[in-house]
Image (tube, coloured by chain):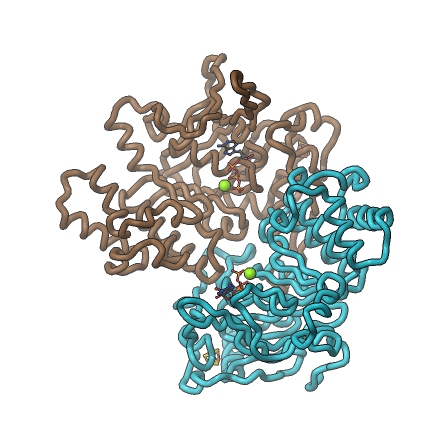
Chain colours: A cyan, B brown
């Protein structure tokens, strides 16, 4: 166990990022000081419930925020360069080629009026110095690698001629044909059936290993996180509340929100007893709760929780933002021991 | 009942054979359970048509439900699982009478749901079988107060009730689903997803029905909200002793709530039995594949995976023989000729497979 963080293999580091949206009813503080990192060759998960800021994080990194949104403070260091300081022209060379994005809805990401060949080769020839024939060959090779049968002929089909799972494979092939270093995947399998999800995750995982990619997987499915990623960042109300190696963190969650979240899912092995619930509702982000954003729902909250808890490094490559994690942890250990 | 079917491409198959005595798969999970819903050889085909100025040509049929026999027992929760497009929603809509069968019947006790003998029977069926949807928002009138929406069925079915009685019933049901009386004076858009689902449950339960069809009632909710709705449904189910057909694509959820489970593939039930039996010792290769595909959050176990090849075939061109044969990991030549029927395989589990799993499939290895 080491008590200092390893800085050498960081690929992406988001530091104290604030992203706000202007709306008619006020300023939505979607990201409120988000700090996390993605390392070289690792698969990391961003998890949290609806509205906690997962998609906005990806949009901030790639600088593709909706018009009313802006990252007002913080740093997004990618290989030592702060992406927030790049010109839009420089940013265009980062998008796709360095950092690729995979969406939840594979249909809306493809243009229905063009063939798959056109949509793949356009992207490839834009970013790589190849002619049309070579681009087509790269596309076909990539389609083969993600398991699309008869890629040589199917490349001339239109998106509607593919099923949802096949379309997601096309998008993976297109994203990876540019040989990016980091793949941001925003709920890439949420729209798919479980058997198809298993196929697609299997492909993403093996491509990540084969190509030495880093993967930042956004999802709300804790099962997917557990089976696909090495490390996880838990989001709540526009902040990261807990981070660590996936297996270790799931086995021994320490933040009250993470603990409650893991207990609220029905498990295949658990009995039929009552599920744990989290009282209250997710915070609204125009007037968010002061201090720890979880405090109105937290059973351990005290007065100090009305100030912002600092992020603490607690060993085992884990971090947490909670004032009382130590007492809570000791209490849980005692309860476990006495059972 | 002419008015129940909204789709223009409804297809009716002429019944050519006289009715034969049928054997129903599955058995009640408790001794004094009665059959409340009986589905007999149900088929629901949608025609695919090409229309020109003069002629309408039928190009083929989508076999959404393709021969289902099923009994639902009083007070049980029957989970219905299967991949997108396998016919879960069509089956449930046909059961509540929103769709007309192409062939076969659905009975609520002694009443044929699609051919009630009179108005009284029709009302009785409507009152006793209720539906809960994935997002009740789309089924709630956005311009009506929740209390008015909840009051409406009482006006139809209990004209004898006074205004005070009706309001009393509305407040009571709101409380039972964990809301307050004042929530009745709000509009649907003023509720969160979880609260709307509570309203959806209240609307179904206010008639004190015997059967509820819940089509993906928690699929649109966050896990922490989902947990509270699942807890609520369990409480209400035992309190009201209502039988529920619970549709979900999340197998862990289905395992948590149901007593029995039916697994569907391409319009058919391929396996049905007590939840523990089906999930702990699945016999049909499709059930095995489905279970193995669930991503598993528990870090203390490692799960074996059977990754299925290919996609679900189209319900228009079904593979010959067993309809799972194009993706099955156990497929033999015989499977491509013979269409297996549901048979009692072991315990109380029925499955439709020529080469079912006899040995328990080990999904989990302790780490
Ligand atoms: N264009 C916008 N204008 C105003 N608010 C926005 C906008 N886009 C996002 N938000 C708000 O920012 C917050 C974070 O949204 P985000 O889309 O990142 O959530 P998410 O974690 O991806 O949720 P989900 O799991 O539902 O996809 C939400 O409260 C959302 O309403
Ligand atoms: N009104 C209709 N007209 C034509 N085809 C239909 C109609 N309703 C359903 N279908 C088709 O019938 C099949 C079964 O659909 P159904 O909605 O019952 O599936 P499901 O199991 O509920 O799927 P999901 O999990 O996606 O909700 C699908 O192929 C669907 O496209
Ligand atoms: S800081 Fe306080 S309110 Fe926040 S999670 Fe920890 S104990 Fe709960
Ligand atoms: S009948 Fe054959 S193809 Fe069908 S499920 Fe059984 S083993 Fe597989
Ligand atoms: Mg999102
Ligand atoms: Mg459906």
Quarter location, residue A64:
bottom right
- The percent position of residue A136, horizontal first and vertical second, equals 82, 47
In the displayed structure, does residue B122 sit left or right of residue B41?
left
Which is more toward the observer, B151 or A184?
A184
- The percent position of residue A162, horizontal first and vertical second, equals 67, 40
In the displayed structure, does residue A230 sit left or right of residue A212?
left
Q: Is residue B305 visible?
A: no
Which is more toward the observer, A222 or A56?
A56
| Vertical comparison of A96 with B147: above or below | below
| Vertical comparison of B184 with B267: above or below | below
| Vertical comparison of A76 with A2: above or below | above
Residue at left 75%, top 75%?
A: A79
Q: Which quarter of the rendered image does ligand 5 occupy?
A: bottom right
Which is more toward the observer, A94 or B347?
A94
Quarter holding the N terminus of chain A? Answer: bottom right
The number of numbered discs placed on residues in the rendered structure image is 0
Residue at left 30%, top 41%?
A: B209
Q: Is residue B211 visible?
A: yes
- The percent position of residue B356, horizontal first and vertical second, equals 65, 36
- The percent position of residue B251, horizontal first and vertical second, equals 54, 49
């Amino acid at each position: 166990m080491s008590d200092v963080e390893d800085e050498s293999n960081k690929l992406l580091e988001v530091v104290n990022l604030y992203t706000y949206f202007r709306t008619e009813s006020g300023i939505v503080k979607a990201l409120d000081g988000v700090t996390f990192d993605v390392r070289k060759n690792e698969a990391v998960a961003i998890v949290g419930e609806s509205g906690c800021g997962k998609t906005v994080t990806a949009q901030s990194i790639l600088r593709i925020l909706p018009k009313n949104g802006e990252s007002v403070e913080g740093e997004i260091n990618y290989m030592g360069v702060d992406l927030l300081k790049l010109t839009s022209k420089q940013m265009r060379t980062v998008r796709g080629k360095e950092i690729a994005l995979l969406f939840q809805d594979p249909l809306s990401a493809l243009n229905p009026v063009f063939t798959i060949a056109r949509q793949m080769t356009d992207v490839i020839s834009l970013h790589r110095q190849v002619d049309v024939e070579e681009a087509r060959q790269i596309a076909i090779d990539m389609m083969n690698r993600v398991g699309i049968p008869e890629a040589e002929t199917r490349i001339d089909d239109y998106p509607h001629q593919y099923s949802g799972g096949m379309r997601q494979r096309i998008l993976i092939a297109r994203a990876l044909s540019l040989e990016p270093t980091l793949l941001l995947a925003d709920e890439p399998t949420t729209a798919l059936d479980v058997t198809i999800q298993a196929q697609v995750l299997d492909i993403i995982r093996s491509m990540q290993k084969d190509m030495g990619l880093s993967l930042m997987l956004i999802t709300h499915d804790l099962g997917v996180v557990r089976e696909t990623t090495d490390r996880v960042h838990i989001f709540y109300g526009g902040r990261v509340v807990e981070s660590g190696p996936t297996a270790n963190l799931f086995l021994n969650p320490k933040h009250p929100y993470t603990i409650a979240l893991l207990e609220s899912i029905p498990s295949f092995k658990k009995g039929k007893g009552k599920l744990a619930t989290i009282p209250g509702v997710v915070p609204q982000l125009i007037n968010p709760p002061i201090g720890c954003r979880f405090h109105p729902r937290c059973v351990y909250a005290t007065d100090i929780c009305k100030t912002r808890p600092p992020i603490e490094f607690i060993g085992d490559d884990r971090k947490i933002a909670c004032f009382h994690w130590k007492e809570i942890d000791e209490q849980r250990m005692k309860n476990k021991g006495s059972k | 009942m002419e008015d129940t079917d909204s789709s223009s491409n409804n297809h009716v198959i002429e019944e050519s054979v006289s009715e034969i005595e049928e054997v129903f798969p599955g058995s009640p999970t408790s001794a004094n359970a009665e059959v409340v819903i009986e589905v007999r050889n149900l088929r629901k085909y949608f025609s695919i048509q090409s229309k020109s100025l003069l002629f309408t040509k039928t190009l083929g049929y989508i076999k959404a439900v393709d021969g289902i026999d099923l009994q639902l027992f009083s007070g049980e929760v029957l989970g219905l699982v299967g991949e997108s497009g396998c016919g879960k929603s069509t089956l449930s809509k046909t059961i509540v009478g929103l769709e007309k069968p192409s062939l076969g019947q659905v009975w609520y006790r002694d009443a044929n749901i699609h051919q009630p003998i009179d108005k009284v029977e029709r009302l009785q069926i409507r009152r006793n079988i209720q539906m809960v949807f994935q997002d009740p928002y789309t089924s709630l009138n956005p311009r009506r107060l929740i209390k008015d929406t909840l009051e409406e069925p009482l006006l139809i079915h209990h004209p004898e009730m006074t205004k005070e009685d009706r309001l009393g019933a509305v407040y009571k049901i709101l409380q039972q689903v964990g809301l307050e009386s004042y929530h009745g004076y709000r509009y649907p858009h003023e509720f969160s997803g979880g609260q709307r689902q509570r309203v959806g449950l209240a609307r179904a339960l206010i008639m004190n029905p015997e059967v509820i069809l819940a089509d993906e009632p928690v699929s649109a909710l966050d896990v922490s909200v989902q947990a509270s709705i699942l807890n609520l449904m369990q409480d209400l189910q035992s309190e009201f002793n209502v039988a529920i057909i619970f549709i979900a694509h999340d197998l862990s959820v289905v395992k948590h709530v149901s007593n029995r489970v039916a697994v569907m593939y391409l319009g058919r039930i391929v396996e049905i039995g007590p939840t523990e039996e089906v999930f702990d010792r699945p016999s049909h290769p499709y059930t095995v594949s489905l279970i193995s595909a669930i991503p598993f959050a528990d870090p203390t176990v490692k799960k074996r995976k059977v990754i299925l090849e290919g996609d679900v075939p189209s319900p228009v061109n079904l593979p010959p023989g067993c309809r799972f044969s194009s993706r099955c990991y156990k497929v033999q030549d015989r499977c491509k000729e013979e269409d297996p029927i549901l048979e009692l395989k072991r315990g109380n589990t029925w499955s439709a497979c020529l080469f079912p799993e006899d040995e328990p499939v080990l999904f989990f290895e302790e780490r």
